[in-house]
Protein backbone atom coordinates (compact mmCIF):
# COMPACT_ATOMS: atom_id res chain seq x y z
CA UNK A 1 0.00 0.00 0.00
CA UNK A 2 1.37 3.43 -0.90
CA UNK A 3 1.64 5.69 2.08
CA UNK A 4 1.22 8.92 0.18
CA UNK A 5 -1.68 11.03 -1.02
CA UNK A 6 -3.63 10.03 -4.11
CA UNK A 7 -4.14 13.71 -4.91
CA UNK A 8 -0.92 15.33 -3.68
CA UNK A 9 -0.60 19.08 -3.24
CA UNK A 10 2.58 20.42 -4.83
CA UNK A 11 5.14 21.45 -2.26
CA UNK A 12 3.43 19.75 0.69
CA UNK A 13 6.00 17.59 2.49
CA UNK A 14 3.37 15.28 3.97
CA UNK A 15 1.81 14.63 0.56
CA UNK A 16 5.15 13.60 -0.89
CA UNK A 17 7.25 12.09 1.89
CA UNK A 18 6.71 9.70 4.78
CA UNK A 19 7.64 12.39 7.30
CA UNK A 20 9.39 10.03 9.72
CA UNK A 21 9.93 6.35 10.43
CA UNK A 22 6.99 4.46 8.86
CA UNK A 23 5.17 2.46 11.53
CA UNK A 24 1.72 1.61 10.16
CA UNK A 25 -0.47 2.37 7.18
CA UNK A 26 -4.22 2.18 6.71
CA UNK A 27 -6.53 3.27 3.92
CA UNK A 28 -7.00 6.86 5.08
CA UNK A 29 -3.93 7.47 7.26
CA UNK A 30 -0.41 6.42 8.15
CA UNK A 31 1.53 6.51 11.39
CA UNK A 32 5.16 7.53 11.59
CA UNK A 33 7.61 8.00 14.45
CA UNK A 34 9.02 11.50 14.54
CA UNK A 35 12.68 10.74 15.40
CA UNK A 36 12.96 13.42 18.09
CA UNK A 37 15.89 12.70 20.39
CA UNK A 38 14.39 14.63 23.31
CA UNK A 39 10.98 12.94 22.93
CA UNK A 40 11.68 9.51 21.47
CA UNK A 41 8.13 8.18 21.98
CA UNK A 42 6.67 10.75 19.60
CA UNK A 43 4.32 9.41 16.93
CA UNK A 44 2.32 11.17 14.27
CA UNK A 45 -0.86 10.06 12.57
CA UNK A 46 -0.83 11.65 9.12
CA UNK A 47 -4.11 11.83 7.21
CA UNK A 48 -3.50 10.50 3.72
CA UNK A 49 -5.30 13.16 1.71
CA UNK A 50 -4.38 16.80 1.96
CA UNK A 51 -6.88 18.52 4.23
CA UNK A 52 -5.81 21.38 6.46
CA UNK A 53 -8.20 21.13 9.37
CA UNK A 54 -9.69 18.31 11.43
CA UNK A 55 -13.15 19.71 10.83
CA UNK A 56 -12.62 19.25 7.08
CA UNK A 57 -13.31 15.56 7.72
CA UNK A 58 -16.85 14.18 7.92
CA UNK A 59 -17.81 12.86 11.36
CA UNK A 60 -17.16 9.20 10.54
CA UNK A 61 -13.62 10.00 9.40
CA UNK A 62 -12.99 12.20 12.43
CA UNK A 63 -14.00 9.27 14.61
CA UNK A 64 -11.79 6.87 12.65
CA UNK A 65 -8.90 9.30 13.02
CA UNK A 66 -9.33 9.88 16.73
CA UNK A 67 -9.87 6.18 17.45
CA UNK A 68 -6.49 5.45 15.86
CA UNK A 69 -4.90 8.34 17.79
CA UNK A 70 -6.42 6.95 20.97
CA UNK A 71 -5.10 3.46 20.17
CA UNK A 72 -1.58 4.89 19.87
CA UNK A 73 -2.09 6.72 23.15
CA UNK A 74 -3.24 3.51 24.83
CA UNK A 75 -0.25 1.46 23.71
CA UNK A 76 2.14 4.20 24.84
CA UNK A 77 0.47 4.25 28.25
CA UNK A 78 0.55 0.45 28.56
CA UNK A 79 4.15 0.01 27.45
CA UNK A 80 5.85 3.13 28.86
CA UNK A 81 3.72 4.31 31.82
CA UNK A 82 4.37 7.95 30.89
CA UNK A 83 3.63 10.81 33.26
CA UNK A 84 1.24 12.24 30.64
CA UNK A 85 0.17 11.88 27.04
CA UNK A 86 0.09 14.98 24.87
CA UNK A 87 -2.15 15.09 21.79
CA UNK A 88 -2.18 17.95 19.32
CA UNK A 89 -2.96 18.92 15.75
CA UNK A 90 -1.45 22.30 14.93
CA UNK A 91 -0.25 22.42 11.31
CA UNK A 92 0.82 26.07 11.36
CA UNK A 93 3.92 25.21 9.34
CA UNK A 94 2.63 22.17 7.43
CA UNK A 95 -1.14 22.56 7.04
CA UNK A 96 -1.74 18.92 6.11
CA UNK A 97 -3.74 17.20 8.84
CA UNK A 98 -1.51 15.30 11.25
CA UNK A 99 -1.88 14.43 14.92
CA UNK A 100 0.99 14.44 17.37
CA UNK A 101 0.87 11.67 20.01
CA UNK A 102 3.67 12.17 22.51
CA UNK A 103 4.55 10.25 25.67
CA UNK A 104 5.81 12.73 28.26
CA UNK A 105 7.79 12.01 31.39
CA UNK A 106 8.50 14.06 34.49
CA UNK A 107 12.20 13.66 33.74
CA UNK A 108 12.04 14.81 30.10
CA UNK A 109 13.81 17.97 28.99
CA UNK A 110 10.68 20.15 28.84
CA UNK A 111 8.19 18.72 31.34
CA UNK A 112 5.76 20.12 32.40
CA UNK A 113 6.05 22.50 29.46
CA UNK A 114 4.73 21.46 26.07
CA UNK A 115 7.43 20.05 23.78
CA UNK A 116 7.21 23.38 21.91
CA UNK A 117 7.88 25.39 25.08
CA UNK A 118 11.02 26.29 27.01
CA UNK A 119 13.47 23.57 28.00
CA UNK A 120 13.45 22.91 31.73
CA UNK A 121 16.51 20.71 32.21
CA UNK A 122 19.17 18.75 30.39
CA UNK A 123 18.61 15.04 31.06
CA UNK A 124 21.68 13.20 32.36
CA UNK A 125 21.15 10.26 30.01
CA UNK A 126 19.64 10.20 26.51
CA UNK A 127 15.85 10.02 26.75
CA UNK A 128 15.66 6.88 24.63
CA UNK A 129 17.67 4.99 27.26
CA UNK A 130 15.03 5.70 29.88
CA UNK A 131 12.15 4.17 27.92
CA UNK A 132 10.91 0.81 29.16
CA UNK A 133 11.52 -0.82 25.78
CA UNK A 134 13.63 -0.25 22.65
CA UNK A 135 12.10 1.90 19.91
CA UNK A 136 11.90 -1.01 17.48
CA UNK A 137 9.75 -2.91 19.96
CA UNK A 138 7.69 0.20 20.67
CA UNK A 139 7.11 0.72 16.95
CA UNK A 140 6.02 -2.92 16.67
CA UNK A 141 3.64 -2.53 19.60
CA UNK A 142 2.10 0.59 18.04
CA UNK A 143 1.75 -1.13 14.67
CA UNK A 144 0.14 -4.18 16.32
CA UNK A 145 -2.32 -2.00 18.26
CA UNK A 146 -3.44 -0.35 15.01
CA UNK A 147 -4.29 -3.60 13.17
CA UNK A 148 -7.87 -3.64 14.56
CA UNK A 149 -8.24 -0.14 13.10
CA UNK A 150 -7.30 -1.22 9.60
CA UNK A 151 -3.53 -0.78 9.61
CA UNK A 152 -1.06 -3.09 7.99
CA UNK B 1 -26.95 22.88 35.41
CA UNK B 2 -23.85 22.80 37.60
CA UNK B 3 -20.71 23.10 35.57
CA UNK B 4 -18.48 21.19 37.97
CA UNK B 5 -17.58 17.55 38.61
CA UNK B 6 -19.99 15.32 40.49
CA UNK B 7 -17.01 13.49 41.99
CA UNK B 8 -14.39 16.24 42.37
CA UNK B 9 -10.73 15.46 43.03
CA UNK B 10 -9.36 17.57 45.87
CA UNK B 11 -6.97 20.22 44.67
CA UNK B 12 -7.90 19.94 40.98
CA UNK B 13 -8.71 23.44 39.69
CA UNK B 14 -10.89 22.11 36.86
CA UNK B 15 -12.99 20.03 39.26
CA UNK B 16 -13.67 23.03 41.45
CA UNK B 17 -13.67 26.14 39.26
CA UNK B 18 -14.99 27.11 35.86
CA UNK B 19 -11.48 27.79 34.57
CA UNK B 20 -12.44 30.72 32.35
CA UNK B 21 -15.45 32.54 30.96
CA UNK B 22 -18.36 30.05 30.90
CA UNK B 23 -19.69 29.68 27.35
CA UNK B 24 -21.68 26.43 27.22
CA UNK B 25 -22.45 23.43 29.38
CA UNK B 26 -23.61 19.92 28.49
CA UNK B 27 -24.06 16.77 30.53
CA UNK B 28 -20.48 15.53 30.23
CA UNK B 29 -18.52 18.71 29.44
CA UNK B 30 -18.42 22.47 29.55
CA UNK B 31 -16.81 25.05 27.28
CA UNK B 32 -15.02 28.11 28.59
CA UNK B 33 -13.08 30.94 26.94
CA UNK B 34 -9.53 31.15 28.21
CA UNK B 35 -9.16 34.96 28.48
CA UNK B 36 -5.74 35.06 26.83
CA UNK B 37 -4.99 38.57 25.53
CA UNK B 38 -2.55 37.32 22.88
CA UNK B 39 -4.97 34.64 21.65
CA UNK B 40 -8.45 35.97 22.32
CA UNK B 41 -10.27 33.26 20.33
CA UNK B 42 -9.04 30.52 22.66
CA UNK B 43 -11.68 28.11 23.94
CA UNK B 44 -11.41 25.04 26.13
CA UNK B 45 -13.70 22.06 26.31
CA UNK B 46 -13.39 20.71 29.86
CA UNK B 47 -14.59 17.17 30.54
CA UNK B 48 -16.86 17.26 33.56
CA UNK B 49 -15.51 14.27 35.45
CA UNK B 50 -11.88 14.04 36.44
CA UNK B 51 -10.08 11.77 33.99
CA UNK B 52 -6.46 12.43 33.06
CA UNK B 53 -6.24 11.05 29.55
CA UNK B 54 -8.44 11.11 26.46
CA UNK B 55 -8.13 7.32 26.19
CA UNK B 56 -9.69 7.02 29.65
CA UNK B 57 -13.01 7.70 27.90
CA UNK B 58 -14.98 4.94 26.18
CA UNK B 59 -15.23 5.32 22.41
CA UNK B 60 -18.72 6.86 22.43
CA UNK B 61 -17.61 9.58 24.86
CA UNK B 62 -14.42 10.24 22.88
CA UNK B 63 -16.59 10.77 19.83
CA UNK B 64 -18.97 13.04 21.75
CA UNK B 65 -15.98 15.02 23.00
CA UNK B 66 -14.29 15.40 19.63
CA UNK B 67 -17.56 16.23 17.87
CA UNK B 68 -18.01 19.16 20.26
CA UNK B 69 -14.37 20.20 19.78
CA UNK B 70 -14.90 20.06 16.04
CA UNK B 71 -18.07 22.14 16.31
CA UNK B 72 -16.12 24.84 18.14
CA UNK B 73 -13.44 24.65 15.45
CA UNK B 74 -16.06 25.01 12.73
CA UNK B 75 -17.66 28.11 14.23
CA UNK B 76 -14.25 29.75 14.73
CA UNK B 77 -13.43 29.06 11.08
CA UNK B 78 -16.77 30.38 9.87
CA UNK B 79 -16.76 33.54 11.96
CA UNK B 80 -13.05 34.49 12.06
CA UNK B 81 -11.47 32.92 8.96
CA UNK B 82 -8.29 32.15 10.94
CA UNK B 83 -5.02 31.18 9.27
CA UNK B 84 -5.12 27.89 11.19
CA UNK B 85 -6.90 26.12 14.01
CA UNK B 86 -4.82 24.51 16.75
CA UNK B 87 -6.25 21.65 18.81
CA UNK B 88 -4.47 20.09 21.76
CA UNK B 89 -4.96 18.18 24.97
CA UNK B 90 -1.82 18.31 27.08
CA UNK B 91 -2.66 18.42 30.80
CA UNK B 92 0.92 18.30 32.04
CA UNK B 93 0.13 20.88 34.70
CA UNK B 94 -3.57 20.17 35.24
CA UNK B 95 -4.18 16.49 34.42
CA UNK B 96 -7.95 16.86 34.12
CA UNK B 97 -9.04 16.24 30.52
CA UNK B 98 -9.48 19.49 28.62
CA UNK B 99 -9.12 20.35 24.95
CA UNK B 100 -7.66 23.60 23.69
CA UNK B 101 -9.32 25.03 20.57
CA UNK B 102 -7.40 28.07 19.37
CA UNK B 103 -7.91 30.26 16.31
CA UNK B 104 -4.50 31.30 15.02
CA UNK B 105 -3.66 34.15 12.67
CA UNK B 106 -0.57 34.94 10.63
CA UNK B 107 -0.40 38.27 12.47
CA UNK B 108 -0.61 36.85 16.00
CA UNK B 109 2.31 37.20 18.40
CA UNK B 110 3.57 33.62 18.02
CA UNK B 111 2.54 32.43 14.55
CA UNK B 112 3.67 30.02 13.15
CA UNK B 113 4.92 28.80 16.51
CA UNK B 114 2.53 27.07 18.86
CA UNK B 115 1.04 29.38 21.49
CA UNK B 116 3.41 27.68 23.96
CA UNK B 117 6.47 28.48 21.83
CA UNK B 118 8.63 31.54 21.36
CA UNK B 119 7.01 34.88 20.60
CA UNK B 120 7.67 36.03 17.04
CA UNK B 121 6.48 39.62 17.09
CA UNK B 122 4.65 42.23 19.13
CA UNK B 123 1.36 43.06 17.40
CA UNK B 124 0.80 46.76 16.81
CA UNK B 125 -2.80 46.59 18.00
CA UNK B 126 -4.37 44.32 20.63
CA UNK B 127 -5.28 40.97 19.10
CA UNK B 128 -8.91 41.24 20.15
CA UNK B 129 -9.32 44.33 17.96
CA UNK B 130 -8.35 42.34 14.89
CA UNK B 131 -11.05 39.70 15.30
CA UNK B 132 -13.98 39.93 12.90
CA UNK B 133 -16.49 40.15 15.75
CA UNK B 134 -16.56 41.09 19.45
CA UNK B 135 -15.85 38.34 21.96
CA UNK B 136 -19.36 38.43 23.37
CA UNK B 137 -20.74 37.69 19.90
CA UNK B 138 -18.11 35.01 19.35
CA UNK B 139 -19.03 33.37 22.66
CA UNK B 140 -22.68 33.44 21.63
CA UNK B 141 -21.85 31.86 18.26
CA UNK B 142 -19.86 29.10 19.94
CA UNK B 143 -22.64 28.45 22.44
CA UNK B 144 -25.22 28.34 19.65
CA UNK B 145 -23.11 25.90 17.62
CA UNK B 146 -22.95 23.54 20.59
CA UNK B 147 -26.72 23.31 21.14
CA UNK B 148 -27.07 20.40 18.68
CA UNK B 149 -24.44 18.60 20.76
CA UNK B 150 -26.40 18.89 23.98
CA UNK B 151 -25.19 22.20 25.35
CA UNK B 152 -27.35 24.77 27.05
Image (spheres, coloured by chain):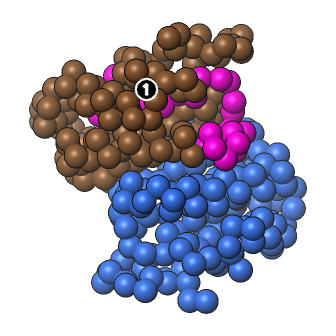
Chain colours: A brown, B blue
Q: Can residue B85 be seen here?
A: no
Residue segment shown in magenta: A35-62
Q: Can residue A35 be seen here?
A: yes
Between A143 and B34, the one lying in front of the other is A143
Between B58 and A116, the one lying in front of the other is B58
Task: Name the residue at the bottom extreme.
Answer: B1
* Circle 1: element type: loop
Quadrant of the image containing the C terminus of chain A: top left
Q: Seen in the image, is A115 located left or right of residue B81?
A: left
Image position of A38 with respect to B24: above or below = above
Residue A142 location, x and y as percent?
31, 32
Q: Seen in the image, is B100 located left or right of residue A10?
A: left
Task: Name the residue at the right extreme.
Answer: B132
Residue A17 location, x and y as percent?
53, 11
The local crowd at label 1, few if under 14, some if 14 to 19, many if 20 or more residues have their Cα within 10 Å, is: some
Between B147 and B96, the one lying in front of the other is B147
Q: Is residue B70 magenta?
A: no
Residue B88 location, x and y as percent?
52, 50
Rendered image quadrant of residue A90: top right
**Residue at image point 53% right, 10% down:** A2
Residue B104 location, x and y as percent?
69, 46
**Count of residue discs:** 1
**Residue at image point 14% right, 32% down:** A133
**Residue at image point 54% right, 39% down:** A65
Using the image, name the chain to which the residue with label 1 belongs.
Answer: A
- The residue carrying mark 1 is A151
Q: Is residue A61 magenta?
A: yes
**Residue at image point 16% right, 36% down:** A131
Q: Seen in the image, is B15 located left or right of residue A142?
A: right
Q: Seen in the image, is B80 located left or right of residue B1?
A: right
Amino acid sequence: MSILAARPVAGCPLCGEAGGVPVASAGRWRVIRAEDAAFPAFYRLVWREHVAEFSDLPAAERHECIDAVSAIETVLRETLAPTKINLATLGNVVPHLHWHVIARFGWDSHFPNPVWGAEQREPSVPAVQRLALPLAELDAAVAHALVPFGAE
